[in-house]
């Protein structure tokens, strides 16, 4: 039987592991008035938690690129939170990329999430890769650069080692942080972090956390991104009424919280939350981490 004193010691140890944690939040540019209202409500709620930065995804068409630019500048101007736009290189020339980067730097943006981007239909091999984009951005200005990492392998990579060496090339080109694809098996992340260290990758490997609000959407995302959804997670949602959003949110928050606790015990000090423009679950998890308004 655990004594009262042992219980208090365990609680204090758990809380100490959750101190000095950095968080960041990812949003996507809204395409409707309703989605825009949801986005700004979420930004307003999460900004007081003083995240390390907020990132905004980047679409392949010019209209969505413009929305990304607008959202990035508005977040940074109105909240004071450092904001990191995503920038992809498969749909822009080197000249265009340099112009975009210079505009961001002149606007006070100091971090960019540098990505290859999805290949347009019919394109088998891009002219530029993410490592090329990192070099271009570093040549324009001294940006802090985040890149993508894939604990379960990028869907286009032929094998795990090829994918890991690609990450190493991005870091050697100047990236100082890698944000992982979302995952649900913490051992997958920890093994990947160990393999990255063994390969000489010295950038911070930030776990990407997806608080599940919609199980069906999760399964679809996972199928597109080569993410394994464990059997235990499927069972948690089995038989649950699809209209019972309150219970689904409780499950999603609990899953993410348990992952964060495990990873914090393993020394992780920065978590990146894929918010899907919703604040509720990310806010609850950050409250558990001790982040307050």
Image (cartoon, grey):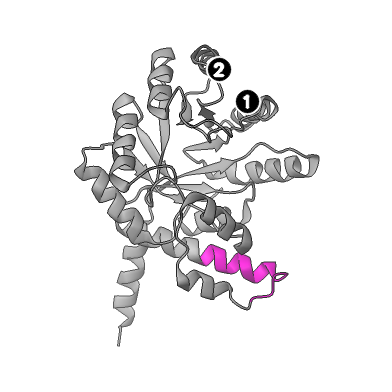
Q: Is residue 16 visible?
A: no
Describe residue 221's horizontal placement relative to residue 171 as left or right.
Answer: right
Seen in the picture, residue 213 relative to 67 is either above or below; the reply is: below
Question: Where does the magenta region start and end?
Answer: 240-254
Residue at x 38% of width, y 42% of height: 157
Quadrant in the picture for residue 251? bottom right
Q: Secondary structure at mark 1?
A: helix
> Which residue corresponds to the image point at 56% horizontal and 64% vertical from the top-left?
252
- Residue drawn at x 30%, y 70% is 9
Label 2 crowd bin: few (<14), some (14–19), many (20+), radius 10 Å: some
Circles 1 and 2, Cβ within 8 Å, touching? The answer is: yes
Q: Is residue 40 left or right of residue 133?
A: right
Q: Position of residue 69 (x, y in %)?
A: 63, 25
**Residue for badge 1:** 69
The quarter of the picture where the N terminus appears is: bottom left
Of 98 and 37, nearer the camera is 98
Side of 186 where 248 appears, left or right: right
Number of callouts:
2
Task: Tell me which label, 1 or 2, sits earlier in the chain.
Answer: 1
In x, y percent, where is residue 8?
Answer: 34, 73
Going by the image, does 211 lie left or right of 230? Answer: right
Q: Neighbour class for label 1 at 10 Å: few (<14), some, many (≥20)?
A: some
Alpha carbon separation for disc pair 1 and 2: 9 Å
Question: For residue 171, which quarter of the picture?
Answer: top left
Give the prevailing secondary structure in the magenta stretch: helix
């Amino acid at each position: 039987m655990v004594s009262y004193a042992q219980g208090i010691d365990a609680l204090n140890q758990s809380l100490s592991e959750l101190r000095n944690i950095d968080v960041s939040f990812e949003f996507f540019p809204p395409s409707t008035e309703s989605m825009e209202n949801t986005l700004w409500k979420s930004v307003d709620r999460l900004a007081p938690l003083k995240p390390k930065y907020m990132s905004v995804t980047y679409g392949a068409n010019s209209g969505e690129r413009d929305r990304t630019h607008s959202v990035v500048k508005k977040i940074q101007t109105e909240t004071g939170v450092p904001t990191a736009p995503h920038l992809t290189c498969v749909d822009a020339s080197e000249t265009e990329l340099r112009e975009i980067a210079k505009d961001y730097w002149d606007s006070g943006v100091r971090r960019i999430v540098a990505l290859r981007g999805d290949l347009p239909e019919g394109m088998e091999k891009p002219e530029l890769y993410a490592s090329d984009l990192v070099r271009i951005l570093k040549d324009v200005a001294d940006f802090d650069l985040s890149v993508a990492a894939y604990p379960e392998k990028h869907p286009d990579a032929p094998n795990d080692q090829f994918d890991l060496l690609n990450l190493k090339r991005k870091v050697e080109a100047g990236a100082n942080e890698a944000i992982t694809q979302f995952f649900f098996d913490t051992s997958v992340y920890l093994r990947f972090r160990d393999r990255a260290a063994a390969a000489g990758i010295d950038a911070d490997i930030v776990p990407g956390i997806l608080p599940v609000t919609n199980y069906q959407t999760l399964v679809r995302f996972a199928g597109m991104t080569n993410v394994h959804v464990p059997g235990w997670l499927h069972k948690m949602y089995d038989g649950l009424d699809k209209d019972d959003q309150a219970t689904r949110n409780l499950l999603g928050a609990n899953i993410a919280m348990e992952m964060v606790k495990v990873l914090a015990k393993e020394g992780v000090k920065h978590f990146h939350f894929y918010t899907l423009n919703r604040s509720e679950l990310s806010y609850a998890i950050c409250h558990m981490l001790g982040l307050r308004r």
